[in-house]
Image (cartoon, rainbow, N blue to C red):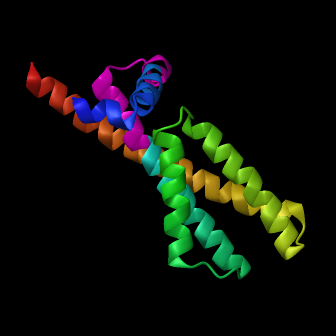
């Protein structure tokens, strides 16, 4: 327990705040909070991958290092800081729109259509993941009783 005070209790309090929010938002037990973080990470990874695809389509060179850095930063933001995934996704999408329009000079309509398609795919993937996780959890709960 000594080394915990050395690192400073700020991180653990952040996590406590995070869990409090998770519980209030998802209205689940601590076990549920773990799942919601898993769900968050799924969204982050999916979003990053879709961004990479869009940038590649535009013709921007994307290095693996950049992808890793962005993913890690987003994961830290989502897991440590109290931010719901929806906010992250919205911010990312808006930034993407701006970048795409500036870089390509293409009409905003075609870009919006592209982004909407991507977001739809992300949502579908996340829903599938959540359904699968929920099914597994339901099985686990049933087998526990």
| Residue 20 in sight | yes
Q: Quadrant of residue 143?
A: top left
Q: Which of the image's four quarters has the N terminus?
A: top left
Eyeballing the image, is 122 above or below 77?
A: below
Q: Residue at x 16, y 31 (%)?
A: 140
Instruction: Say whether residue 114 is left or right of residue 79.
Output: right
Q: Identify the image quadrant of residue 9.
A: top left
Q: Is residue 52 left or right of residue 75?
A: right
- Asked whether 77 or 115 is in front, the reply is 77
x and y percentages locating residue 45 in the rendered image: 48, 57
| Spot occupied by residue 138 in the image (x, y as percentages of width and height) | 23, 29
The part of the chain drawn in magenta is 21-39
- Please report the residue visible at 90 percent of the width from the left and 67 percent of the height from the top: 107
Count of numbered badges drawn on the protein:
0
Is residue 51 located in the magenta-colored stretch of the structure? Answer: no
Q: Residue at x 62, y 46 (%)?
A: 89
């Amino acid at each position: 327990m000594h080394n915990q005070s050395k690192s400073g209790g700020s991180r653990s309090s952040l996590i406590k705040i995070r869990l409090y929010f998770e519980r209030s938002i998802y209205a689940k037990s601590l076990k549920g909070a773990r799942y919601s973080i898993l769900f968050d990470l799924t969204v982050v990874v999916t979003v990053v991958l879709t961004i990479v695809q869009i940038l590649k389509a535009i013709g921007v060179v994307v290095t693996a290092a950049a992808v890793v850095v962005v993913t890690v930063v987003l994961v830290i933001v989502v897991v440590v800081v109290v931010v719901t995934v929806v906010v992250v996704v919205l911010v990312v999408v808006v930034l993407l729109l701006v970048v795409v329009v500036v870089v390509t000079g293409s009409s905003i309509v075609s870009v919006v259509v592209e982004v909407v398609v991507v977001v739809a795919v992300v949502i579908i993937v996340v829903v599938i993941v959540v359904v699968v996780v929920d099914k597994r959890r339901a099985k686990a709960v049933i087998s526990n009783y």
